[in-house]
Image: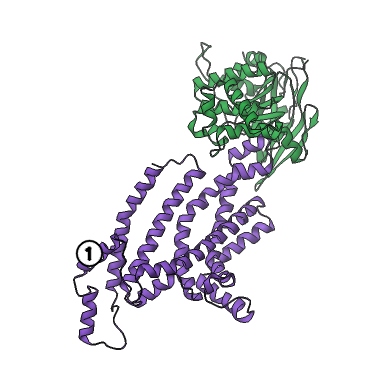
Chain colours: A purple, B green
């Protein structure tokens, strides 16, 4: 197990390198630079700035400087927020995104799994129909449509919840962003759980469990639950990725001071180091989560052996 | 001494399918006494498995049962599920064919065995563990202690079938239903498992129903046989008599299509045609279209199961009276 994790972490290094090269190339291909303002600045000042940040050197050399910094854990200074390093900015913003993302993930599992199971157990009933059609709706409405509508209804008209802002993660401020972010995943998890539960309930070992005279509670929770959750667990990897990406949109709409905001601002301002830093951070997070999911899988299915 | 364990009367099992109602079991009577080992023989789709799934109350959700099933004098049909749960795995146990999929892949053998005792006997985990270990040893599983900690996929097919048998016998059931228990095993393991069955049923006095399409299995361990065709019993009697003088053309066909190592004649004759479509059962005898002896009477009137040779133990559902004479 330990050996496997080390192997996977080492295997992630080339992936990270490729991602860094790609992001570095893309952001430099984009027209403009970090110091292009509406107000033109004197040529000497610009030359000085470029020299300070090595922007006057060939791209390959620039990448070399950047890489050697990253290896030492230094993501460089932000070009735009000059008083902060990128590491500091990520340190400030990540807790916000983390809280948002984890809440959305927990809601997705806490609502989606039971809803899917109930729908499977009461197959073809009215309840099943309600769960399935609601989840279909949740899946097809894009977040950027749903979120503004929610803001209009609950923020502007009903005035139940704050329209935007983080307010140190106060509960009323979290409600709408978390719901908007989690809804597609609630829907997806519910449909997935329903499908896998139906399949498991048809399986031979459930028949065996019933033939043994076990009460329904044991049949469901001991014999059916774990296998039914397997597909959901393997979905968690992509789900975490999706929630991370989705939070970029959500943070923008609700004006939350999370990573997503820096990602977007960084890209618009050509804040090279900030974009690089946030991208690398996202990528590392996803690779890590995929490893965590694969390891978690072994706890659910003893037939899976990690090598 | 020979107390009735299972009495089935006029059992019908129907399934509601998109194409219409299908009668998988169509009016069967069967008695099983203590110590009996009854073979239920028939080809796929003859209703032999569905009949006993109905006894266990484990039919698919579109299935319906009518008739009467009495286990130790208690009527099982329409018994509430919680009462049925107390009987399943306790007084009557069932063993399934495909052990790889019939054991829960994510639970250790110990868990799957001990939960039966915890539920039916109210044992503690330690007590249940001790009894489970004892049972694994009784079914001659090597290194039983180690097996308890293993998962099904870590055991061989033969061992998994032994685990299934141990699991079924934990609560000393009066009736053990084995649905093709040896079909998925290779021949040498098959023989071992059948020996084990024979030994256990003599030791424990449990009545055994052996559902199989393999006449060899029946010949090995059964005392009596019921041959099923298209949801009905067509011939019934003591194993030896059925094998020596089959009276129903279908039974004859089955025996002739089975290879025998002890007979000098090595030719095998297949039964022509296909079993009838259960959705559109023909009038009269269901076997008529495949039968070499079919008469006009067979098309108009379905033969009922009646005693043959004037003996109550021996019965067949066929209009022919002197079949042996014609079968040379």
**Above or below, B262 relative to A244:** above
Per the image, the residue denoted by label 1 is A64
**Above or below, B37 relative to A198:** above
**Above or below, B16 relative to B206:** below
Q: Quadrant of residue B57?
A: top right
Q: Residue furthest front?
A: A83
Q: Disc 1: which chain?
A: A
Residue B168 in sight in this render = yes
Q: Is residue A145 left or right of residue A74?
A: right
**Above or below, B288 relative to A34:** above
Q: Nearer the viewer, residue A237 or A140?
A: A237
Q: Nearer the viewer, residue B65 or B208?
A: B208
Callout 1 crowding tier (Cα within 10 Å): few <14, some 14–19, many ≥20 = few
Residue sitting at x 30%, y 78%: A34
Residue A297, position in %: x, y?
48, 47
Q: Nearer the viewer, residue B78 or B66?
A: B78
Residue B278, position in %: x, y?
66, 38
Q: Quadrant of the N terminus of chain B?
A: top right
Q: Secondary structure at mark 1?
A: helix
Residue B223, position in %: x, y?
67, 16
Q: Is residue A192 left or right of residue B281?
A: left
Residue B271 in sight in this render = no
Residue sitting at x 49%, y 40%: A302
Q: Quadrant of the C terminus of chain B?
A: top right
Q: Is residue B231 left or right of residue A282?
A: right
Q: Quadrant of residue A13?
A: bottom left
Q: Nearer the viewer, residue B56 or A68?
A: A68
Residue A65, position in %: x, y?
23, 66
Q: Quadrant of residue A46?
A: bottom left
């Amino acid at each position: 197990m330990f050996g496997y994790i080390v192997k996977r972490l080492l295997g992630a290094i080339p992936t990270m390198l490729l991602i860094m090269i790609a992001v570095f190339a893309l952001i430099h291909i984009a027209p403009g630079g970090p110091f292009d303002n509406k107000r033109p600045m004197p040529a000497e000042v610009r030359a000085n700035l470029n020299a300070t940040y090595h922007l006057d050197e060939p791209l390959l050399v620039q990448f070399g400087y950047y890489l050697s910094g990253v290896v030492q854990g230094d993501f460089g200074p932000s070009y735009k927020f000059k008083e902060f390093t990128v590491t500091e900015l990520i340190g400030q913003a990540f807790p916000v995104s983390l809280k948002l993302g984890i809440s959305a993930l927990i809601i997705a599992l806490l609502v989606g799994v039971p809803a899917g199971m109930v729908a499977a157990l009461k197959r073809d009933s009215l309840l099943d129909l309600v769960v399935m059609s609601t989840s279909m709706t949740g899946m097809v409405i894009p977040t950027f449509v749903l979120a503004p509508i929610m803001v209009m209804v609950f923020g502007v008209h009903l005035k139940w919840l704050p329209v935007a802002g983080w307010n140190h993660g106060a509960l009323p401020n979290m409600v709408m962003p978390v719901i908007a972010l989690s809804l597609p995943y609630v829907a997806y998890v519910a449909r997935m759980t329903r499908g896998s539960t139906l399949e498991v309930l048809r399986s031979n070992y459930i028949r065996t469990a019933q033939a043994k005279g076990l009460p329904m509670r044991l049949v469901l929770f001991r014999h059916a639950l774990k296998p039914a959750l397997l597909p959901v667990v393997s979905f968690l990897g992509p789900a975490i990725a999706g929630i991370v990406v989705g939070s970029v949109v959500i943070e923008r709409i609700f004006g939350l001071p999370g990573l997503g905001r820096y990602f977007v601002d960084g890209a618009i301002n050509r804040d090279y180091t900030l974009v690089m830093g946030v991208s690398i951070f996202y990528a590392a997070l996803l690779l890590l989560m995929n490893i965590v999911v694969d390891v978690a899988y072994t706890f659910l299915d003893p037939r899976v052996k990690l090598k | 001494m020979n107390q009735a364990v299972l009495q089935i009367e006029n059992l019908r099992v129907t399934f509601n399918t998109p194409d219409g109602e299908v009668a998988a079991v169509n009016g069967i009577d069967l008695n099983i006494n203590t110590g009996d080992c009854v073979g239920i023989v028939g080809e796929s789709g003859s209703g032999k498995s569905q009949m006993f799934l109905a006894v266990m109350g484990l039919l698919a959700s579109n299935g319906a049962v009518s008739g009467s099933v009495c286990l130790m004098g208690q009527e099982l049909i329409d018994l509430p599920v919680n009462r049925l749960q107390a009987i399943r795995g306790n007084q009557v146990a069932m063993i399934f064919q495909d052990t790889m999929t019939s054991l829960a892949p994510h639970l250790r053998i110990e868990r799957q065995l001990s939960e039966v005792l915890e539920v039916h006997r109210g044992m503690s985990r330690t007590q249940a563990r001790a009894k489970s270990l004892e049972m694994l040893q009784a079914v001659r599983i090597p290194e039983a202690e180690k097996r308890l900690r293993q998962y099904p996929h870590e055991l061989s097919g033969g061992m998994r079938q032994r685990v299934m048998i141990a699991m079924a016998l934990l609560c000393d059931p009066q009736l053990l239903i084995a649905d093709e228990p040896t079909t998925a095993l290779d021949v040498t393991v098959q023989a071992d498992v059948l020996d084990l069955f024979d030994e256990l049923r003599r030791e424990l006095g449990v009545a055994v129903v052996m559902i199989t399409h393999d006449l060899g299995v029946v010949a090995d361990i059964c005392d009596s046989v019921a041959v099923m065709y298209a949801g009905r019993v067509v011939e019934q009697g003591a194993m030896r008599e059925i094998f020596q003088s089959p009276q129903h053309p279908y039974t004859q066909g089955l025996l002739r299509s089975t290879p025998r190592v002890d007979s000098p004649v090595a030719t095998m004759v297949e039964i022509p045609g296909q079993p009838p479509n259960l959705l559109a059962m023909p009038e009269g005898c269901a076997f008529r279209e495949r039968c070499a002896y079919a008469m006009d009477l067979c098309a108009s009137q379905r033969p009922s199961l009646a005693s043959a040779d004037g003996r109550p133990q021996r019965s067949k559902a066929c209009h022919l009276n002197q079949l042996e004479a014609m079968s040379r």
